[in-house]
Image (cartoon, rainbow, N blue to C red):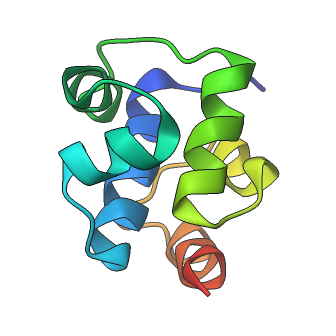
Amino acid sequence: MSISKTQLGQAVRQIRELRGYSQSELGRKSGLQSNTIALIERGERGVSLDAVNNLASALAVPAGCLTMLGTTKIRGDSAASAMVRVCKS
């Protein structure tokens, strides 16, 4: 199963919002530009392994959590929603 850019972006956005971060703040914490964060969240840009690690660290979630969320739909999927809740803690 491959990681979907769109689904990974949705996961990043949802966790970022749960953390109360703006795109700019997440960019600063992760070492990425805020416009890059916007592209990732819209699923318009792929993410390197280094970027996944940086985003996960900035969001205080395991990198594996982000990649798993990138393989399953978030909206309307109760298992994915539960995983987001686990990731946010």
Please provide percent x and percent y for residue 37: 31, 31
Q: Name above or below for residue 27 compared with residue 19.
A: above
Q: Name above or below for residue 79 compared with residue 85.
A: above
Please provide percent x and percent y for residue 62: 77, 59
Please provide percent x and percent y for residue 25: 27, 53
Task: Determine the image quadrant of residue 74.
Answer: bottom left
* Nearest to the observer: residue 80 or residue 19: 19
In the displayed structure image, the side of residue 42 where residue 15 appears, left or right: right
Q: Name above or below for residue 46 compared with residue 56.
A: above
Q: Quadrant of the C terminus?
A: bottom right
The reply to whether residue 75 is visible in this rendering is no
**What is the count of numbered marks?**
0
In the displayed structure image, the side of residue 10 where residue 20 appears, left or right: left
- Residue at 71% across, 22% down: 50
- Residue at 35% across, 61% down: 16
* Nearest to the observer: residue 79 or residue 13: 13
* Nearest to the observer: residue 76 or residue 24: 24
The reply to whether residue 1 is visible in this rendering is yes
Please provide percent x and percent y for residue 77: 48, 67
Q: Name above or below for residue 17 compared with residue 54.
A: below
- Residue at 47% across, 32% down: 31
- Residue at 75% across, 48% down: 63
